[in-house]
Amino acid sequence: MIAVSCDQQALRRSRLARMVRGLVLTVSAVSIALSVVATSALAQGSSPVIKGRDGWLFPGWGSLSQIDRNGIENSTRLIAQARELLASRGIALNVLVIPDKVRLYPGKLPEGTSMSADVQGRYARIMEALNKAGVPTFDDAVVLKDALGKGADVFYRTDQHWTLPAVEATAKATAEMVRKSVAKLDGASGTGMALGPLFKERRYGDLADLFLTPDEREKLGRDIYTVRRQPEAAQLVDETEAPVHIVGHSMVQPYYGFPQKLSNDLDRPVSLNWKPGNIGPWAVMLEYLESSEFRKHKPQVIVWQMFEPTFSYGPDAVGWWDGASLMPPQVWLDRVRAALGT
């Protein structure tokens, strides 16, 4: 099962609501947050959406020409320091970096638009930095390209989020990473979440819904979303202790199925806290480490999900994170240390 700590206060406590209801609410919350991120992009001179070929849309708040090398190094350093602090308390930190949508569909960019050589090498640079710092991770770009090569779309055409084939391939690779982090996961076999049947729904992607005119949306049409309906017995969030906890943003929310698939592959309960992308990964990690849930039960492994285009933005990235989430890097590290009692 999955103990879910979602964006809505009403869903944070156990045994409060059906997961399906939570999925509807959280998708709406992501749309609101996405508009906030786009506002930041506009303030910095970027378009909120890139209108590509064949009706493909891309988020416009990531640079296609420049990368922040110092930012990548600084973020990696903070992550490595957090990993050491967690390790001192017997908790393994694993990092999942989801690649930019543009990286998987460069041929769908508008005519005359392309990634610079620096941006083409950005994901590899992040992987190299994490590996050099001894932070467990894996190359999800390779995983997604493999799924794409087998004929599966890995991102929705008019949405910033990934598809079920991408989610499940990444969850499988994440499970392999987790197993390498600990000799044996706590708990009993047979306690992972059973995967429900597939169902489809047609709706506009978030990029189309928020940033296109009604006429533009109608011309592009809706995307078909394939998700898993969870068995009735798994609908209620419970108090099961989980040896693995996920920290991340909307890509790992239950709607897209990542925590369910990870739980199924590991055959163990998995817990989760996530926030929309405007909150930033640093504040989301603190939310968990400073929570009563963490104090009551510390997992063996934390999987920290991050995103390639924003990896270089530290806790003090003004204009990118919500104002309440901003803090100097040293303050963030001090709060991690305090939460762990080190």
Image (cartoon, helix red, strand yellow):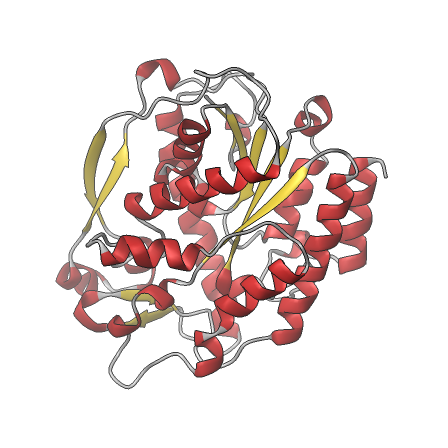
Number of labelled discs?
A: 0
Point out residue 233 in the picture as x, y percentages from the top left corner: 36, 13
Q: Nearer the viewer, residue 70 or 130?
A: 130
Evaluate whether residue 154 shows in this view: no
Point out residue 194 in the picture as x, y percentages from the top left corner: 35, 22
Residue shown at 62% from the left, 75% from the top: 69
212 lies left or right of 268: left
Q: Residue furthest right?
A: 342
307 lies left or right of 194: right
Q: Is 89 drawn above or below residue 276 in the view shown?
A: above
- The image quadrant where one finds the C terminus is top right
Evaluate whether residue 17 shows in this view: yes
Residue shown at 67% from the left, 68% from the top: 73
Q: Residue furthest bottom?
A: 112
Q: Is 325 drawn above or below residue 1 in the view shown?
A: below
Point out residue 236 in the picture as x, y percentages from the top left corner: 43, 17
229 lies left or right of 82: left
Residue shown at 38% from the left, 19% from the top: 235
81 lies left or right of 112: right
- The image quadrant where one finds the N terminus is top left
Point out residue 161 in the picture as x, y percentages from the top left corner: 36, 52
Q: Nearer the viewer, residue 299 or 330?
A: 299
Snapshot quadrant of residue 102: bottom left
Q: Is 189 drawn above or below residue 222 in the view shown?
A: above
Q: Nearer the viewer, residue 112 or 145?
A: 145
